[in-house]
Amino acid sequence: MAKIESSLLNIGYLETLSCQQTPLHRLDPRVKLLTTLVFIVAVVSFGKYEITGLIPFIIYPVTLIAVGNLPPGYLAKKILLAAPFAFFIGIFNPLLDRAILVHLGPVGISGGWVSFASIMIRFILTVSAALILVAGTGLNAVCLALERMGAPASFVVQLLFLYRYIFVLTDEALRLVRARSLRSFQGRGLGFRVVGYLIGQLLLRTLERAQRIHRAMLSRGFDGKIRLVRSSAIHLKDAGFLVGWVTLFVLMRWYNIPYLLGHLVMGLAP
Amino acid sequence: MSHHLVEVRDLEYSYPDGTFALRGVSFRITHGEAVGIIGANGAGKSTLLLQLNGCLLPQAGTVRIGDLPLNKKTLSHVRRTVGMVFQDPDDQLFMPLVYDDVAFGPLNLGLPLEEVDERVKQALATVGALHLKDRPPYRLSGGEKRAVAIASVLSMSPSILVMDEPTSYLDPQTRRQLINLLKTFQHTMIIATHDLDLVLDLCDRTIILKTGQVAADGPTRRILQDGELLHASGLEKPLCMQGCPVCPAGQSSANL
């Protein structure tokens, strides 16, 4: 219970981070969203056994963390939280794919381990980019950027409402859980049957709240469309951010920079 | 200014599960009146309020707001005239930021952006919450949420304000501030509440609902002094009209 609470407080912290005033935060949300998308596509599009080609991409999260004044330790913890998903996707590769791919001195490394490492690197890169996007922009602004860029309005509204009410919902869930634990003794009443009731109860309350919210919206003239006022203009520096990073991603995608560097160094040494 | 008029005639409503909420309610509220609607739990207060801006439509009887009978055709006009402040501000504040929330109504009315901006700022300033405009609603205290919820309705400049339990969730001082704020409003006000002291402070007229019917309708001071009537309706005298526990017995502070 305490865990749920604290991890939610952490979401609040992400929101706090997004309210800073740094060059990163001042950029147009659309530009950041688009750059993040290109970054993710570039990272994901590499071949299965690629490791060296992925390494240079680390420059993007590192630069943004520095410019955006974001706490690396906190972001690392958030990444770790999601790590099990990627871990279990990749963990069977070493068992299934045993062909030796690389020799590091006397040790042969199988293709499975290489692809596993590749999956983990990609995971870290993409998740950190997404987290930085939210911490450097704010989820609401990201949603609005999505809408401006042509995402279906109903989808964006769902996302906005989810984000608005997740705090209210967890509050309600916490109250239920607390009320139960205060009246369960020696572990009685903590079984799955009661959990079922709690979830049912929560669903009913949520439906009721949804109805009340809908009424409140209708009372203020809601007609199916959410309108928001945001002044926005893409400035030169926004365009520069986008073009600069995308060019770099494309270069890093097409040219294996560590390999070229190695080649250069080896070429210099006779 | 006939559009400030609220007239309810023989209003009946029962919920889909068969419980009767309103059985023949009638009253007429004229321009600038402040009316308290009181009654025990389940007396039909909330149902009645939902009828006043068409969240629920009458099954029998009529609701007239100003010159218009309330029906599906007049719904949008009525909702513009009747500003509804719901009991739980979390239900009312559904937008990402306070500003967006207060702008929600005016934007739906199709007003030009400068006008919207002006209305939002004015509404927030009226309730003393202008400094909150860039905050997300879940980061506000109970009193701030309530103030913003009221601003979100004021921004549509309604002529009639309908409020459901405006003082719930508020600490005593915040409650007092809210009452002082409401006193400054020129709107026709309809307030459903259990806070009888609030009714005494704000409303000249009181309607008591009892099992879906009007049990009494008249000047607040007369009604709230009628101990028998109040008792029969599941209520009791406002605290400030009850005997003071510290003063010697019999010396009631109710010298109103």
Image: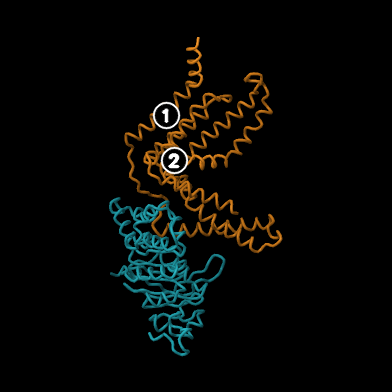
Q: Quadrant of the N terminus of chain A?
A: bottom right
Q: Earlier in the sequence, mark 2 or mark 1?
A: 2
Does mark 1 fall on the same chain as mark 2? yes
Residue that label 2 marks: A151
Residue B173: x and y, percent? 41, 69
Residue that label 1 marks: A246
Dot 2 falls on which chain? A
Q: Quadrant of residue A201?
A: bottom right
Which of the two residues, A179 or B189, is positioned nearer the viewer here?
A: A179
- Secondary element at tag 2: loop
Residue in view at x 42 percent, y 85 percent: B253
Residue A269: x and y, percent? 50, 12
Q: Quadrant of residue A20?
A: top left
Q: Is residue A266 above or below residue B147?
A: above
Instruction: Indicate the chain coloured orange by its letter.
Output: A
Q: Tell me if B29 is positioned left or right of B50 in this view.
A: left
Residue in view at x 48 percent, y 60 percent: A212
- Secondary element at tag 1: helix
